[in-house]
Amino acid sequence: MKDFFELFNITKEQLILLMEEALSSGGEYADIFCEYSLQEVLALRDGEVNAIRNDIDFGAGIRVIRNGRTGYAYSESTDMKHLRAAAQAAARIAESPTASGKTAQFTTLKLANYYTLNQTSAEFDVFSKKEYLKEIHTRLSEGDSRIVQIMGQSSCSLTKIMFFNSLGEFYCDERPLASVAFSAVFSQDGVTDNYTCSKSFRMGNEMFTPSIADEIVDEILDAIPTVLEAIRPKGGEMMVVMGAGGSGILLHEAIGHAFEADFNRKGISIFSDKMGKKICNKSISIADDATIPANRGALNVDDEGVPGQKTMLITEGMLTSYLHDRISAEHYKVAPTGNGRRESFRFEPIPRMRATYMENGTAKTEDIISGVRKGIYVDKFRNGQVQIGAGDFTFFVKSGRMIENGRLTYPIKDINIIGNGPGALADILEVASDGKMEDSTWTCGKGQQCPVSCGMPTVLVKSLTVGGSN
C-alpha cells in the first residue's frame, strides 16, 4: 500500500480532502480512481519481430453523483492542484443549496486475489518473448506448406489502481493481463482463406508457456484443411447446434448486454419488465463471474470499490439479476454486483460484463447432435451486429459443419446466423454438460473498451435463420 501512495504521490489525508472538495456543492457520493498502466506489445511480420511498443498511462478521475446524475473530470497528473481542480469541476453537477456531504471513516477493503502474477511488467524479458513468437512462426510455416503469410503479436500489461470514495472505502489493486495471437493466411488451388487463434489471461510473463504455444499451433494447423474444404451451404430456417466455448460470444453480444442494468433502467432492454419471471428453459442458468482465477474477465474488485463476485443472471430459466453499478443498484434498491467498469481513468464506470457463461446442463453432446435430422453445427464466429434493446442479431460463422440425419458431415463456412437473442434463448431445447470458457482476446466495446471472456456448453436451438448460398 505504501508503494501505491508513493507512486501516485498522494497521502491518505489528501484523499479525504479531495472527497470533501468533491462533495462541497451538495454531492451525495464521490470517488477517485488513480491509475498507472504499463503495456508492452511485440508484433511479428514477415518472419521477424519488427515492432516493439511500450506505453505508459497515468492519471486520476474524480466522480460526483447526485440524484442519479454524474459529474466527471480527470487529470493526467496527480498533483494536488490539478486534482482539486478536477474535484471542483466534477462537483458542479451537484450544485445545490443543501449541506455538503461528509466522507466516512477511512477503511481498507479486504479483497480476494484472482490473478496470477509471478513477475511485474517491468521484469518481462523482451528477448525471450521475441524468440517465443519466432518459434511459433517457424512451427506454423514448417507445419503446412499452404501457409503463405503469418502474423503474430504478444501483449503484456500491468495496471496499478488506487481507489477511494466518500463511503471511506479504499483499495489498491494490481491487474496483470497477457495475450498472444497468431493469424495465418493459407492458399490452395485458387482458394485463399485465413484463421486466427489467440489466448489471454490475467497473468504475467508466466503465461508464455510451451503448452500455450502448442495450443495455438495445433489449432491453426488443424483448421487449415477444414477451412479450405468448407463450402457455403444453402440457407433457410433450421436447427442450430452451438458448440461449447466459442459460441459464448453470441451469448455475450446478443443476450448479455440486455442484462446490463443501465439498459434496463432506461427501458431499452427487452428484459426491463422481466425480473423474477421465467424467460427460458429451466435447464438454463447464466452467470457473470469475476472470480475465475487468471481469467481475462476476472476482477478482484470493480472500478468503483465493489469486490469481485459471481452474479447469477438466470437461475433455472428465471431472470434473477441484472448487472449493476452503484447508480443502477441505487435505482433498483439492490446491492451493486461488481460490474462498474471503465476503460481507464478518463472514463466514468458503467455496467459492463466480466466473464459471462452458461452453466452446464445434463445432456450429452453426441445425443444432441444425433437428435437433429437436418441443421448446422457452429463453433467459431467472426464479426456480428446486435441491436441491444431488442436483441436482434446477425453473426458471421467462420467454421462449422452440416448435420444430416444425426451426423456431422461436410464442413461449412461463410454463412450468417440471424435471429433474436431473447428469442434464441427461449428456443434452446437442450444444454450439454461440456461447458468451457473461450480464453481468447475478447474485448467488449460500449463507448469504451474492457477485456472480457465468455463461454458455454453445447446447446440446441430449435430454429434460427441461416443465410447461405441461396
Image (tube, rainbow, N blue to C red):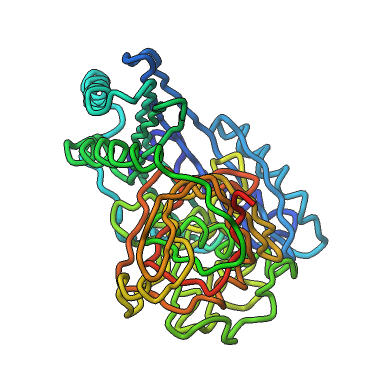
Please tell me in which quadrant of the rendered image residue 225 appears: top left
The image shows residue 386 at horizontal and vertical percentages of 65, 55
The image shows residue 243 at horizontal and vertical percentages of 39, 61
Residue 266 lies left or right of residue 105; in this view the side is right
Please tell me in which quadrant of the rendered image residue 286 appears: bottom left
Q: Nearer the viewer, residue 389 or 46?
A: 46
**What residue do we see at 49% from left, 55% from top?**
249
Image quarter where the N terminus lies is top left
Q: How many marks?
A: 0
Query: Compared with residue 58, is residue 440 higher up or lower down, i.e. above or below?
Result: below
Residue 166 lies left or right of residue 151; in this view the side is right
The image shows residue 393 at horizontal and vertical percentages of 64, 58
**What residue do we see at 40% from left, 15% from top?**
51
Residue lying at the far left of the rendered structure: 210
**What residue do we see at 59% from left, 42% from top?**
61
Residue 199 lies left or right of residue 326; in this view the side is left
Query: Is residue 176 among the parts visible in the rendering?
Result: no
Please tell me in which quadrant of the rendered image residue 113 appears: bottom left
The image shows residue 102 at horizontal and vertical percentages of 61, 62
Q: Nearer the viewer, residue 52 or 186?
A: 186
Query: Compared with residue 258, is residue 378 higher up or lower down, i.e. above or below?
Result: above
**What residue do we see at 56% from left, 41% from top?**
345
Query: Is residue 437 among the parts visible in the rendering?
Result: yes
Query: Compared with residue 249, is residue 6 higher up or lower down, i.e. above or below?
Result: above
Q: Nearer the viewer, residue 142 or 196?
A: 142
